[in-house]
Amino acid sequence: MGQFNPLRSAAMGSRAVDRFYEDVRKDARAGKPVAWLLGSLILSPMITSMDIPWVFGDALAAHLAARRIQRKPMEVAEDLGYLVETCSYTRTHMGCSLLSDEDRAAGPQDWDIPKPDFVIISDQGCTEWYEWGDDVSKRFGVPMFTVHVPCVWEGDGREEVAYTVGQLKEMNTFVEDITHRRQNWDKLTDIISVARQAQLFRDEAQKLCRSVPSPASIFDWATALGAVFNCWGQPESVETYQAMKQEMEERVAKGEGAVMGEKYRLAWDGMIVWPMFGHLAKKLAAAGACTVTSAYMWGFFPELMSPDNTLESISRNLTEVWCNRSLDFQIENVTALCQEYGIDGLICHAHYTCRALCGQQLELMDAVTRRLGIPGMVLEADVGDETFYSDAQVDTRLGALLETIDARRSRVR
Amino acid sequence: MSATLTNLDILLEDPYRRARELKEQGRKVIGVSPMYFPEELIHAGGGVPMVLQESAEPVTTGMAHLYPFFCGFTRSTVDMGVRGKLDVFDALVLGDLCIQLRHMFKTLKRQMPATTFVYMQWPLEISERFHSTVRDRLGKCRVALEEVLGRKIEEAALRDSIALFNRNRALLRRVFDLYRAKPGVMRARELMALVQAGMLMPKEEHCQILEEMLPGLEQRPATRDKVIKVYLAGHLCMAVKVEILDLIEDLGAHVVWDDLFVGYRYAASEVSQDLPPIEALTQHYFNLGIPCPTRWEPKSGWSDYIMARAGESGAQGIIILMVKQCGPMLLYYPWLREVVTGSGIPQTLIVTEHEMISLEGTRTRLQAFMEMLGKGA
């Protein structure tokens, strides 16, 4: 019925990823200290501004899974005792870092990740980064710093923001002491200015998805994530979102959709099924279903950054990210997205090994259905481990979801 | 002694029976999520704290609220919550030592709108950096609890409660010492029942039971010899199924040390009686006696503790008990396995599930492990 019609501009993100990792390898070979970040990317500007290369473990795992080169690292991890129920991002990242020299040499360049000199974790939305970071710290004998992000469940979050700013200052001292480098506050301000530009383009581009058909799907946003995750605050992130916005505007003018033959507009909750990315994009498109919006995909960096107050900006984006908020907030957020983008149904990706970012989906789906009357489905799979994916299950449930939407439409008429 | 333990078994079949009885007497009963919230705060305000327990019943209605790939404790508790089994509590105090407990809290809060919830977000780095954070948050919990209990939590009352709970821990540790030193003096399942009962009844009553039981226990001789000495590690938040404990003993093993939550961990350390009470409770969070994989302890981790205690206790093997889908254990296990394997002490991993369909797989695994240990002895 429909056809997947990806944005060309979103692929800029993929190319940016390759350049990013190449630079990291080059900097490490040149003797620069290497940081590993776990938990939040929003800390990366403070590292970049000190000219320290870094690897964001979560993004590396997603990157390998999207390219379907995560299986060997996961097998290595499993041999070392990381059971299959363990977060597949952890398994992939740790497995990749613990590959034998022979395996690494025989594998893709993506597996060549420099070892850390220190590790930083932040715990917004999940606590397992403590154990993951502890594991890194012990195995590589490197120091760890933790940023403890208080949940913002009520109030305006000012207290939590101030509390976290204090820790960012401590983190800065930690990095300075370890690396004997000084923070370059001017450079940090510049990075935040660039990040702000990217946010503005992103926010404008997202609004274009209100059009019918939607000029982009979450698969486009996911493709662009490479530029966001690895080049946040760098020109590539601005260029990617600017190009996406322009291409989307052209599509809106022509009435061209991300799914040719869009019949159903869906919201996606949870992370991407990275190993089945293209397969799922085509499957949904074939059914005429466009995943128009996603609290997860659009939820990074929720607060517009301000170069006038860099640490507070970083802190706001740590504390106010949706997964650090109350269930009520999440329900309001998804309900608003569904209303604004004319959503017919909800797909909740229940990722088997990540309990953090899907733990409230059953409550969320129940609440949104009660409020808006739109149906939802649970898609059981995983972010990085394709063995948890079943086509038959997806076909059955997707078919039922779309039939329910059809039935609802006929009743409304 | 046996009669007392039989009575405790009855209590464990219906964990919140005592809570209902106390409610009928007009007491305020407050459910506390595992593992480290200071129950003394509740006691000092006149309430009865009870540590929430996994139910023996299968998860039914709760399936619609929490995914099956959550741990048995969170699924079971949500299930009890949506089926009205937690309504007996005047409030629930929930802390998030792991992300699953946080989700459990959020789900229960939506599904139990009439219940008062008190939330404690623990910083999970065990260092001076977070000392004031814990003290401040405990202070806020104190205020919230005062509202639930309808009265001030006075300093003097808090000191008395700390003393009572310390006495309870000391008595429990004496029982553990006897159990370890005299194989066969009581079953592992009885010891666990004793700890679990203490989580489910007023501490005054529990102290009385322990004090009545101890003289008999001290006089009783060891009844088993030629035992295989094992260390039981892990199993956070909830009790080990008694069938597994029976299996371990029936295969010839004797537990010379453990760090199970419904075990020695619950009684391992005392709260200082020399410091101002809130300060003492704060310090206790940072000095629990047994490191825990839910927390990052930069100075000395859980694996260090296990190796030291295994050596001191003469353990021939280590049985690591992991609750299926327990995030902290899943992530700590690879390192622990490496450390234990490197030390030369044999180890085996047993994953336990809420819905235990068959013990046969566990039996085979443990049998092979014991045979290996027996040959090495």
Image (cartoon, helix red, strand yellow):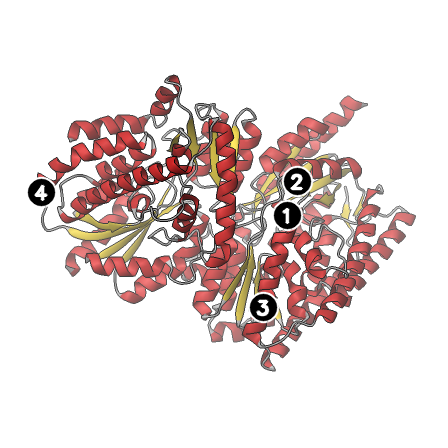
Residue at mark 4: chain: B
Q: How far separated are the C-alphas under marks 2 and 3?
A: 30 Å
Q: How far separated are the C-alphas under marks 1 and 2?
A: 9 Å
Marks 4 and 3: which is nearer the front? 3
Residue B118 in the image: x percent, y percent?
51, 35
Q: Is residue A333 left or right of residue B234?
A: right
The three-letter amino acid code for the residue at tag 1 is Glu
Residue A208 in the image: x percent, y percent?
84, 47
Q: Which residue is mark 2?
A: A155
Circles 4 and 1, Cβ within 8 Å, touching? The answer is no
What is the quadrant of residue B261 in the picture? top left
Residue at mark 1: chain: A
Q: Which residue is mark 1?
A: A159
- Image quadrant holding the N terminus of chain A, namely top right
Q: Earlier in the sequence, mark 3 or mark 1?
A: 1
Q: Which mark is residue A173?
A: 3
Categorize mark 2 by other alpha carbons within 10 Å: few (<14), some (14-19), many (20+): few
Question: Which type of secondary structure does the marked residue at label 4 adopt?
Answer: loop
Categorize mark 4 by other alpha carbons within 10 Å: few (<14), some (14-19), many (20+): few
Residue at mark 3: chain: A
What is the quadrant of residue A241 in the picture? bottom right
Q: How far separated are the C-alphas under marks 4 and 1?
A: 60 Å
Circles 1 and 2, Cβ within 8 Å, touching? The answer is yes
Residue A86 in the image: x percent, y percent?
47, 52
Residue B138 in the image: x percent, y percent?
48, 43
Q: Nearer the viewer, residue B147 or B323?
A: B147
The three-letter amino acid code for the residue at tag 2 is Gly
